[in-house]
Image (cartoon, rainbow, N blue to C red):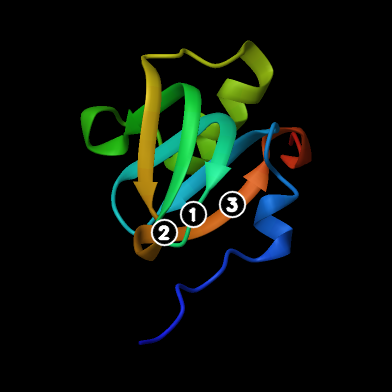
């Protein structure tokens, strides 16, 4: 039996931070990272945004969220790690 894969220390270091999770779908998640497991990220106070519902790109929406604040629409969200393309701190988003 194979041991359960562990989470990268770089991701664990983000626990407690406000992060942006870009996925391979039309969804982007902005929220506080509560936990990181082998299969899921757990976020709280989350702004879940589906770019199919607006004319705003993920990048534009992320910049607007940093500038104006997040619009939390979920208490908690579990994001499947295989769907994650990138993770960054919201504070690391560079305004242009």
- Report the residue marked by disc 2: 81
Residue displayed at 22% across by 37% down: 52
On the image, numbered disc 1 is attached to which residue? 37
Given residues 22 and 1, the one toward you in this image is 1
Residue highlighted by disc 3 = 87
- At x 74%, y 36%, the residue is 96
Residue situated in front as seen by the camera: 57 or 65: 65
CA neighbours of label 2 inside 10 A, class few (<14), some (14 to 19), many (20+): some
- Lower position in the chain sequence, tag 3 or tag 1: 1
Farthest residue to the front: give it.
1
Q: Quadrant of residue 17?
A: top right
Query: How many residues crowd mark 3 within 10 Å: few (<14), some (14–19), many (20+)?
Result: some
Marks 1/2 in contact by CB < 8 Å: the verdict is no
Q: x%, y% of residue 2?
A: 40, 86
In whole angstroms, how far apart are the C-alphas of marks 2 and 3? 10 Å
* Quadrant position of the N terminus in the picture: bottom left
- Give left or right: position of 34 versus 9: left
Which of the 4 quarters of the picture holds residue 58? top left
Q: Is residue 4 left or right of residue 15?
A: left
Task: Quote the CA–CA distance across marks 1 and 2.
Answer: 9 Å
Q: Nearer the viewer, mark 1 or mark 2?
A: 1
Q: Tell me the SS state at disc 3.
A: strand
């Amino acid at each position: 039996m194979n041991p359960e894969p562990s989470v990268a220390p770089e991701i664990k270091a983000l626990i407690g931070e406000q992060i942006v999770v870009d996925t391979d779908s039309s969804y982007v998640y902005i929220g506080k990272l509560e936990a990181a497991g082998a299969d899921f990220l757990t976020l709280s106070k989350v702004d879940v945004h589906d770019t199919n519902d607006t004319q705003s790109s993920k990048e534009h929406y992320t910049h607007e969220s940093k500038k104006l604040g997040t619009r939390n629409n979920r208490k908690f969200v579990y994001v499947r790690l295989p769907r994650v393309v990138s993770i960054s701190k919201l504070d690391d988003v560079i305004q242009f």
